[in-house]
Image (cartoon, grey):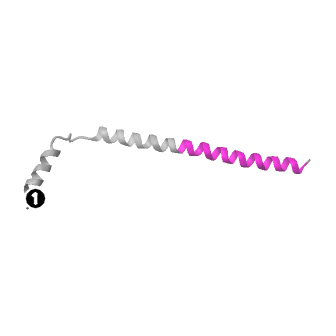
């Protein structure tokens, strides 16, 4: 069968080589996430701005034609 004690010792040895302080890697990961979210917000705001502008232009055209 499986020797769970040996398996646990092997896992412990595998992860022993990882650095103890990962704050730099974590900061980079958070910066990447913030960048991706920012790109999404900018793209969404641009699309929303175009849609709102088109709606206002349509209303302005109807008002102009109604007052002629």
Range of residues picked out in magenta: 41-67
Q: Residue furthest right?
A: 68
Q: Residue at x 76, y 45 (%)?
A: 57
Q: Is residue 3 left or right of residue 52?
A: left
Q: Is residue 55 left or right of residue 63?
A: left
**Residue at x 87%, y 48% (from the top left corner):** 65
The prevailing secondary structure element of the residues shown in magenta is helix
Query: Which x, y percent locates residue 20?
Result: 20, 42
Q: Report x, y in % for residue 23.
A: 29, 41
Residue 50: quadrant of the picture:
top right
Disc 1 is placed on an element classified as helix
Q: Nearer the viewer, residue 7 or 30?
A: 7
Instruction: Judge whether residue 55 is colored magenta.
Output: yes
Taking the image as shown, residue 58 lies to the left or right of residue 41, namely right
Instruction: Report the residue that reaches farthest toward the bottom.
Output: 1
The residue that mark 1 highlights is 4
């Amino acid at each position: 069968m499986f020797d769970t004690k040996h398996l646990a010792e092997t896992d412990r040895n595998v992860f022993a080589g990882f650095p103890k302080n990962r704050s730099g890697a974590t900061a980079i990961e958070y910066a990447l996430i913030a960048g991706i979210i920012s790109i999404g917000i900018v793209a969404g705001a641009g699309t929303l701005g175009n849609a709102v502008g088109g709606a206002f232009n349509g209303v302005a055209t109807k008002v102009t034609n109604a007052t002629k």
